[in-house]
Image (cartoon, rainbow, N blue to C red):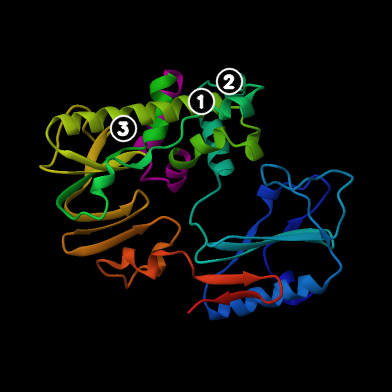
Amino acid sequence: MIKELKELKHCKASYRINYLLIPVSNFPINKRGAIAFNKIYLWLKKQNLYKLKRTRSGGIENGSHMKVPAWDVRANKYCVEITAILEGFAWRIQFRTETPKKLSGRTAFTKFKRLLLKDGIDLEKFAIDNGPEVKKEIEPYIVKVNHKFYIDKIFSNAHHIDFHSSFSAGLANTHPEFRPTLEKVFRDREKDEMNKHILNFSIGFLQSISGCNARWAHLSKDAIKDNNDRVRNLALEVENSGRKVLVFNTDGFWYDGPIYHGKGEGSGLGEWHNDHVNCKFRMSSAGVYEYIEKGEYFPVVRGIPNDTKLSWEWGDIYTKKAVPDIFTFTEEEGVKLNG
């Protein structure tokens, strides 16, 4: 085994290996990162390894029948990931712009579960057996342009409304027994980074098939519906007040006109506030827009990390820069930087 692989983060592997528990090593998308990643990729490619079998949800199909040593490579426009199991250990190696600076949904969920138990609530008693079926009923997040004729138009008096920890608030609204714990987590979110992770990632994990077989998907379903209802209702209030709702982005929306104030505004869990005001705003789609606030330019392009947009200027969302095409991956050569 080459030392470059041996020195990366890894864990012991067994026939019960869980893909989500394999530690991830990251190589940044730059020349040095590409060279280092390719050295490991090309070495593994030369080994006589079986191909990992995947479950429908993307996990590793494990069990006593699993053939090792094994590996696979999965690639998209934003990331190339190698998963390798050999010599009794397992690795996940990624070539991507940056490693997400967050804990896993599982870690946040586990902490949340313990906090609930401390408050006298056993989350296991809420588990269901038909989670995957319930998951299919969950409403999609609201990410859409309100009217197509707002696309490409410049708005000079735009603002953004955001709900505080909206999905956790949705759980508290629909299942009040969770509210005391969630209120404490929300209140102490600035004191402990873990509390932010609980608020941000627990709801998603409740419906994760690979993480928990969606055993609490009904809770996630209720929380998301509550969020969507509140966002839609507030947007309607804003429109009825004579303002223009421009685009929805999950737990908030952009609008144009005088700054809106109304019922439900505040700093508490599930309350809303104007987190961006008096902006110059333009969008090319629901997931691609730009705005200037207090003289500073901010481009938002889903799929392109922030650190690659530091030198962007107004209008760059309409250029090739806004098309995720940072690198190319081929089985023969590995990764190659574009441009």
Q: Which residues are magenta?
A: 176-198
Inspect the image, locate mark 2, and give the three-letter code of the amino acid beneath it: Phe
Furthest-front residue in this view: 149
Label 3, secondary structure: give it. helix
Res. 261 image quadrant: top left
The residue pinned by badge 2 equals 126
Q: Does 98 sit above or below residue 138? A: below
The residue pinned by badge 1 equals 219
Instruction: Determine whether, in the image, residue 278 is placed left or right of residue 28.
Output: left
Measure the C-alpha gap from mark 3 to mark 1. Answer: 19 Å
Q: What number of labels is visible?
A: 3
Inspect the image, locate mark 3, and give the three-letter code of the amino acid beneath it: Val
Query: In the rendered structure, are the residues bearing label 3 and label 1 in contact, judged by CB atoms less than 8 Å apart?
Result: no
Query: In the rendered structure, are the residues bearing label 2 and label 1 in contact, judged by CB atoms less than 8 Å apart?
Result: yes
Quadrant of the frame with the N terminus = bottom right
Q: Any mark on residue 231, and which?
A: 3
Res. 304 image quadrant: bottom left
Can residue 249 be seen from the camera position used here? no
Q: Is 178 inside the magenta-drawn segment?
A: yes
Q: Is 260 inside the magenta-drawn segment?
A: no
- Mark 1, Cα crowd under 10 Å, few <14 / some 14-19 / many 20+, is many
